[in-house]
Image: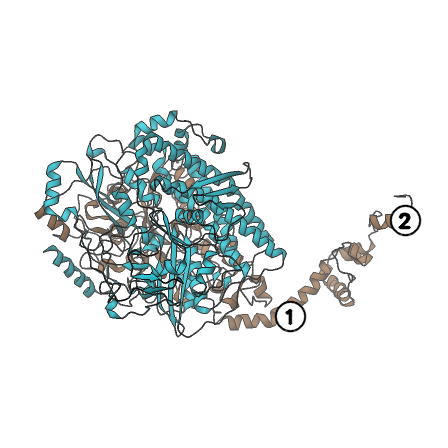
Chain colours: A brown, B cyan
Amino acid sequence: MYDTQTCPKGREGGTLEAKQDTVAPKIQRPPHVGKVFGADVPHGIGGLGGATDGPIEEIHVFWLAGMSCDGCSVAVTGATSPSVEELLAGSIPGMPKLYLHHPVLSVDAGASFVEPFAQAVAGELGAPYVVVLEGSIPDDQAFEDEGYFSGLGVGSDWPESMDSPRADDQPLRVTDWIRWMAPGAAACVAIGTCATWGGVPAAAGNITGSMSLMDFLGKDYSSALGVPVVNVPGCSPVGDNFTEVVAAVLMFLQGSGPLPEFDELGRPAWQFGETVHRHCVRAGYYEEGTFAKQEGDQECLVDLGCWGPVVQCNITERGAINHMGGCMVAGGACIGCTMPGFPDKFSPFYKAPPGSFVSGGTTRVYGAAIKRLRRVTMHNRNREAIWDRSGEVPSAFSSESSKPSLGSKLEGFFYSKLQYRGSVNQAERSREQPNPRTRDIYRQADGEGEGEES
Amino acid sequence: MCFKNLPVEFDENGVAHLKEGVADPYSYEVTEVTPIEQDEAKLKKLLERNGHIRQVDFDPVTRVAGALAFHTVVDLESRQVLETDSMATLFRGYEVILKGRDPRDAIFISSRACGVCGGVHSTTSALALEMAFGIQPPPMGTVARNLLLSLEYLYDHPLHLFLLAGPDFSEPAVRETNPEIWEQAQRAPAAGKEVHGYSTIAEIMTAMTPLTGELYVEALHMTRVAREAYVLIGGKYPHPQTVIPGGISATIDLSDMNEIHLRIVKFFDYGQKVVAVYNDIVDFFYEVNPQYREIGRRPANLIETGQWDDPEAYDATFANVDDWARKRWAPPAVIRDGDLATKSMTALNMGVEEFVEHSFYEDWTDGGAGNGSYKFKEDPNGNPLPPNHPWNKETIPKPQGTNWKDKYSWSTSPRWDRTAMETGPYSRLWAAAVSDDYTKTRFIEPTGKSLKLNVPQGALPGKEYEWVVPTESWGAFERNRARAHAILYTALIAYDNLLIGLDMMRKGDTKVSTKYKMPKDFRVGAGFWGAGRGYLTHHLVMDKGVIENYQILTPSTWMASPKDPFGNPGPYEEAVHATPLLENFEKPEDYKGIDILRTIRSFDPCMPCTTHIHTENRVISRDVVTCACGVDEEHEH
């Protein structure tokens, strides 16, 4: 549908341009506007150091925001393994020099910020680059005239050697940049569920025709290095998932790391291969058929609308920031925000997924039985052998009837028979163990009484 | 007097009503604006007079959240800004997506309007749903939300002060744009050395350098400390997983409270340091050149919704909104020209209008007349509402080319009493300083002219700080100074809420959510809350179990707004227009634009949620686009 190899002809006579040409002399623009650190400081941010002995000495990362909320950028500033400052300062051994061109973090503004983007389009950057997209792609390439849904720079920012797709004074579309930067990129990485799958801007009822980066570039796309679109989903994603992928890919390219594995949807396989339920701190409750009845309860959240058992995500294992938090860890039900179907295939939120009536119903039956059996075993395991011998727990916190019940004794007897079969019966040995002489020292003192205080 | 421009009066009992005898009270005439570039005679005259007229564009304005572009025409000889146009360059149509959905989806969907401050959208949405559903959270649920809000601000303010705005005051920027100031900074002793440890102003500037500066890296770290505490009960950030109608869905135990506690108190020391740093920077620039007071100056017109609900007072009803909103830790207020115009939430709400004359949308009101009929002529308490009010809003997107005379932004132009308002941590501090009929922490004391902050001891000894209402010079530097104080202010309110939460746990009052059944009848709701950068409202209309209309009005929509139909600029435009160009440059070719950038960034622009706005469920087709271009051509001829 679109010609991605060549640039379109510039639009002739955009309304403003035409007016300025005929009506009055054009006002000049100072050439260094926005370059507040001076012309000697490189564009973007970072590139402070890095290894020079690998095949890549320096690499540029162009961060573009489409139909975005900037939440992925914010998530990445929260990453700690590695952190953005570590990547940009070149403080990780073996990593190449990394320059980041990011609208939220870059020092330059305006045309100075956009200049290296144009160099990349024209193939004049002189170093390999990666395109990162945050936010979905709007359908504004389909507009036949001016207008845009997501803009970056103006027509005059386009490389001089090529015809600009927009009139000099009119906003370039983010989709213009993606369309002409993607073929020359070493890799295109989509971060967050909007860029990877479409996300909320592409949900039912949207009027912008939003789609994912993969949908826009299509199955025929592969980068200059032959890599299809890499996808790190999540709304917002775990910051570490993204910085870890960047680090892993760079380590691999530098010859010091294994080949990072991606699944059939371009996701990092080691991060998204498991369901979020498998590592959930509340999954044990599910197994025992015990479910939260109201928000704030500590049990499994499936009845409150949790989709965790069928969602590929690692937040319960990795945490949200610096290994802390995570949706169900805190008590929030999973709404499938890492999945291609998000949000519509998981709404209305707070309603139990229909499938849970089967799976949850099943665990309610067998889980309840297992839970009871475990409670008996746990009761026995919660007692030191010395307490079994003496028949009481030496804590004032302990309830009065701390002696094991007949049932517990019976269970203990048969359970230990099975447990120690083929090995040494430690329970038997424990029973023969003499009591320590100084046990219960204050009761001894009270009982003997004399001479202590009088 | 509350309203000067709207046709609304109050009787002796304080009940609002429309002025009598006015046929079409809210209608207005559109004042045409004439951009310099399109005014042949004016432009010719200017260019003949001197060769120093330049067009200075920032597309994009970086180091702000989201997509903002700024157009100016400057005279580099007289060092004045002649013209300004603020452009939001992104449209996503979130309200269309919300329309026709289950109302319960609103919290998670609307959170995605903004990834910088998603958590406040979640909560504002929950407040709107609670009003519509007629439910309220148990006290501990409100306390937990208050904690989340505080922690969000504690991440947000350092991010702005050192990652976004800070680099403009760092060594490389000052050396490049004002070398004479860098010279002086090396000799200028820093008054706050005891607290921040830097001997000279130059040392502070060096520490503000991106990536290599200690203050830059420390701020990045502190944003994580706040977010670590946030995710313990929020699940994740920026889009929390636990904010629900009727409270919060977090299992809060003593470990959570312990870890949050330890992180909040870190901000006592850090807040002291940031205040000392920004006091030194601001005072130094004023001393070097008093004209720095004029950078980004505009009239003190501020709007503040208030936030941090009193767990006992908040009942989620519109009938009582004036009462429970006054009991917040930060009270609602409108400040006009430095004076308190109103403290009432209903008055604040009835004065809000959104205009689209210079935005890529079609006007739905026929110049404020509302075609004689519009849905909500009154709010639920019987106060008059304008056709341009969010509850009545019906925006129709119209993507088209940029034209400074006509339409040039995806942001609308919100106005209160037809006046451009700014909002942010400073409106919060300002509102809290000039009144005292609200919930106060044991650590904060308003004096009418200032706000005293009694910071408990951390690693640094405890100390009293005072933020003085800057009525004399309201500009970019004061915005940053206020934001620095807002770290301490927020940490103190967070601490107060933590102590209240611990007390509730002690009493066994640990319920955090309310069971509810979603109503299927016609309901309206509104959430009034605040983002890190100020004012945030969600207005909801629902019927038959689906959302009929959902409107989000954000702080940066207020501030990044283009001109209104009366020809008045939005706050960024107004502030940049008043900015003297103090940058040191010899030839026009050397000009970098630091003063303009400092001005824009002082507002902490956050564009993602500025431009989501739309209600009319109309599919944009090429027909619409073509039609829009036709309009464009008309203007050309």
Q: Is A337 positioned to the left or the right of B359 in the image?
A: right
* Mark 1 on the same chain as mark 2: yes
Q: Say which chain tag 2 marks.
A: A
Q: Position of residue B175 (x, y in %)?
A: 32, 30
User: Is residue A235 at all visible to an observer of this figure?
Assistant: no
- Relative height, residue B21 to residue A154 (above, below): below
User: Which element is circle 1 on?
Assistant: helix
- Residue B599 in the image, given as x and y percentages of width and height: 31, 42
Would you name the residue on which mark 2 appears?
A: A448
How far apart marks 1 and 2 lie (CA) works out to 49 Å
Q: Is residue A438 visible?
A: yes
Q: Where is residue B431 shown, x and y percent of the image?
A: 42, 49
Disc 2 on helix, strand or loop?
helix
Q: Looking at the picture, which amino acid does disc 2 mark? A: Glu
Q: Which residue lies furthest to the right in this view?
A: A450
Residue that mark 1 sits on: A369
1 vs 2, front mark: 2
Which residue type carries mark 1? Ala
Note whether B67 is above or below B456 in the view shown.
below
Asked whether B271 or A450 is in front, the reply is B271
Taking the view exactly as shown, the residue that stands out farthest to the top is B187
Vertical position of residue B283 compared to residue A362: above or below: above
Outermost residue, left side: A22
